[in-house]
Image (cartoon, rainbow, N blue to C red):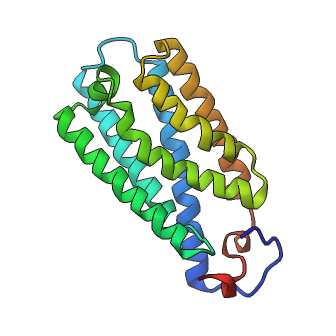
Amino acid sequence: MGERMPCQPLSKEDRISVVLYRSGIVLITAVMVVFSYMFFNLSGSRSDPAISLKFDFLILALYFATGLSVFFIHLYVSRFHRALKKLYYLSVAALVVLILLGRGNALGVLIYKHYGPLLLLPVSGCIGFITAKEAFCFRLLEGYIIALILPLYLLFFAAGGMSARGALYGLTIITGLLVLFTFRKVFQPMHYDIGDKSAYS
């Protein structure tokens, strides 16, 4: 990947796959922005059914968006794509566990159970893979930073290594980096994502 010159004309399927891949990135970032806004304005009980319902909807949206990008990412080496898909399947399994443990209150599990944030590690790995791939191909250096700090953030949160204010600031920093990454990625020419189709294996 990383070719900036068109290697061949793009087919309709190429264009659709690029739109879906980038739509996933946009949706991931949009969900993270809403997450950050929610936590900034979280004033009362985290067991409020309305808050829990919004959070459950958002986390499902995050997994859907991540799946879009995972399944439509363009990688020259097919084994990397297979590995990424397996990681996504693991993340979906972790999401099912999170929902079952929460019994309609996944937010409560993430906030009050030390193991809660660990269930988000697989999906953070998927997001980190996507951002690191773009960083490698197109020098979007914030992609490397996201890939590094997103799982570390979850680990520190699970270990109780940050205050509520620190967790909020950390989430805000990650979201800001995602916004920067998204604006730098989604306006690239479509052929950047396809590269040389003869190199796919």
- Which quadrant of the structure image shows residue 175? top right
Q: Is residue 184 above or below residue 114?
A: below
Q: Is residue 129 above or below residue 95?
A: below
Residue situated in front as seen by the camera: 23 or 80: 80
Q: Residue at x 30, y 38 (%)?
A: 56
Q: Is 178 on the left-hand or right-hand side of 152? A: right
Q: Residue at x 62, y 86 (%)?
A: 11
Query: Where residue 109 appears, x then y in whole percent?
Result: 27, 28
Q: If the image is split into quadrants, where does the N terminus sit?
A: bottom right
Q: Residue at x 35, y 59 (%)?
A: 89
Residue situated in front as seen by the camera: 120 or 50: 120
Query: Where residue 103 appears, x then y in whole percent?
Result: 16, 34
Numbered-mark total: 0
- Which quadrant of the structure image shows residue 54? top left
Q: If the image is split into quadrants, where does the C terminus sit?
A: bottom right
Q: Residue at x 57, y 24 (%)?
A: 170
Query: Where residue 116 appears, x then y in whole percent?
Result: 32, 31
Query: Where residue 77 appears, x then y in whole percent?
Result: 60, 74
